[in-house]
Image (cartoon, rainbow, N blue to C red):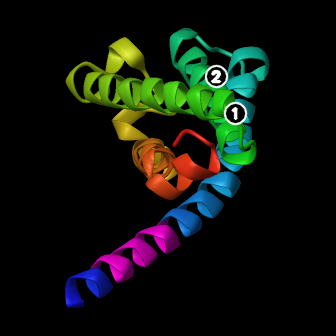
Amino acid sequence: MQQTQDTTQKDKELSTFASVAGGILGVSYPVLAISTGARAVYQLFFKDGVADYLPPALTMVAALLYLVATVGFTRRRRWAWRVSVVALSVETVFTFVVGTLSLINYDLVGHNAWTYFGMDYAFFPLIQPLLGLVWLLHPSTLRAYKIR
């Protein structure tokens, strides 16, 4: 009996976590997409003296991934879930690769949204995709998307 109550309490806590995380992601991802997208557009098209276009291009890729991931947080369809899982997985890989490269050879990747694991954005580019994947893979989220 006690084990059943403990399991029910853990499920309830996880469901609360999933609900709160989904709400945060549904708001933070579009905000991050707009901010990084605006930064990239400014650097690519309006800033004088840009010598290297790779950093703003990487920032634009980040903004597009954030925008694509937002679809999965707002649409409760299987295809949206799949698109978001792919977008967040790619984002996670890019964050780790570019973040590591910025520590090893800054000149290679320059200053972009993923430099130093997203330090300019309070490390949201590092934390958000991991939180997003946890949320998308949570059992209550899978049920909401009719994956299970």
In the image, is residue 142 above or below residue 36?
below
Q: Position of residue 55 (x, y in %)?
A: 52, 19
135 and 76: which one is in front?
Answer: 76
Identify the residue at image location x=47%, y=29%.
Answer: 91
The furthest residue to the front: 1
**Compared to 141, does 145 lie above or below?**
above
Q: Tell me, for residue 86, which label it has, or none.
A: none
Rendered location of residue 110, percent (x, y): 43, 21
Residue 46 spot, x, y in % from top left: 79, 21
For residue 67, the mark is 1
Q: Is residue 36 left or right of residue 108?
A: right
Question: Which one is in front, 64 or 146?
Answer: 146
- Asked whether, in this view, residue 38 is left or right of residue 118, the answer is right
**Secondary structure category for the residue under label 2:** helix
Residue 107 image-quadrant placement: top left
- Amino acid type, mark 1: Leu
Q: Residue at x 31, y 23 (%)?
A: 97
Label 2 close to label 1 by CB (< 8 Å): no
Q: Which mark is residue 60?
A: 2
Q: Which residues are magenta?
A: 7-17
Residue projecting furthest to the right: 46
